[in-house]
Amino acid sequence: MEFTLHRSFTELESLAMDWNALLAESVTHVPFLRHEYLRTWWGTRGGGEWPDSELAVVVARQDGQLVGVAPLFAAKNRDGDPALLLLGSIEISDYLDLIVRPIDLSDFISGLLGFLAHSGPAGLSVHAPEAGSKPWQMLDWQNIPEASPTLPVLKAEADKRGWTFVQEQTYHTPSIPLAGDFETYLCGIDKKQRHEVRRKMRRAEESGNNVRWYRVSDEATLDAEVDAFLALMAEEPEKAKFLTEAMRRQMHLACRAAFENGWLQLAFLEADGQKAAGYLNFDYLNRIWVYNSGIDRRFLELSPGWVLLGYLLQWANENKRLEFDFMRGDEEYKYRFGGVDQFVVRAKVTR
């Protein structure tokens, strides 16, 4: 394998199609690793999460063909250590990993660590104003699915070099396997919860508030609809704090990238023509990925969040989606709706 370091996304534009094609066969295939998503993420440095950082994407080719992408950037991690992190880290990209086919994984990781070990001190550095630039000291890779084959291979390759490997669970990622029929899904959850879902959906429909839900499909209204969704998010104080100017820009860019590539599911519940709840999801790889939500507290008596979630689960079943992934977070409602626990992990390799 021939490894190349890229320091600008401009250099990577010509790889977009090959990048996404490789992702479709990769050890972890998630929307957060698509070229268009990570390009927008880097453009805002994760919505302002990593202002002092340097791009360090390593690409591997064999016989002229793309066989691996390590989507990395250099920064001081949250512990203050110079590190190479995965693009997308940490707050707004729920699942991350390397981009490589299973058959090439061992050779790719072995070659990657060798390349980084020799190129790192001269070519990869972390800006530290108080002491100049420092070479990276560790790989600090977060939000890797616990079942990813990357983890045991990375540990084995680190052990060969006498480097330290540490892995820890970081976030719950509950998801619901879907049967393709809404009634079958409801029969599979707790009886009391099943009754509550049906009751709240029926009550909303019979409320006289002209309740309806819809998915955004008109590109001309997309920016306005995203703004409306962010306004619903900001009803919650913690989310309002999260939505800095840079983060709002990132959300707009991510939504547009997903819309233009056919995998945005931005949905609203309306009551009397006003938005009562919204869900920002990705409809990707025959799965619904639940990214964020917001409600207008003026409509709490309608339980708009639960009702919209019910409609989305009904739609997902009727349209034969295989899974409803709540992604990171262990909020109680996810389990009441039938979420089955999974986890993402943090893997640290210190040389």
Image (cartoon, helix red, strand yellow):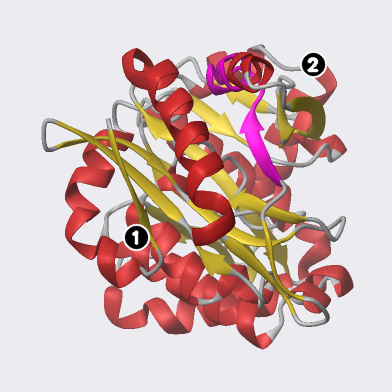
Q: Could you tell me which residue is drawn at 77 percent across and 57 percent down?
A: 77
| Span colored in magenta | 138-154
Tell me the SS state at disc 1. Answer: helix
Q: Front-most of 186 and 156? A: 156
Toward the left, the furthest residue is 64
Query: Quick one: quadrant of the N terminus?
Result: top left
Q: Which percent across, then down, holds residue 132? A: 72, 77
Q: Front-most of 226 and 52? A: 52
Task: Return the mark for residue 191.
Answer: 2
289 sits left or right of 2 in the view: right
Q: Could you tell me which residue is drawn at 70 percent across and 57 percent down?
A: 91
Tell me the SS state at disc 2. Answer: helix
- In the image, residue 280 sits, relative to residue 315, either above or below, namely below
Residue depth check, mark 1 versus mark 2: number of the one nearer the observer: 1
Q: In which quarter of the image is residue 15?
A: bottom left
323 sits left or right of 189 in the view: left
Number of on-image labels: 2
Q: What residue type is labelled 1?
A: Glu
Residues at circles 1 and 2 in contact by the CB criterion of under 8 Å: no
Q: Is residue 272 visible?
A: no
Q: Which percent across, then down, holds residue 179? A: 48, 14
| Residue linked to disc 1 | 36
Q: Could you tell me which residue is drawn at 66 percent across and 41 percent down?
A: 141
- In the image, residue 215 sits, relative to residue 146, either above or below, namely below
Query: Quick one: quadrant of the C terminus?
Result: top right
Q: What residue type is labelled 2?
A: Lys
Mark 2 neighbour density, 10 Å: few (under 14) some (14–19) many (20 or more): few
Q: Which percent across, then down, holds residue 210? A: 56, 66
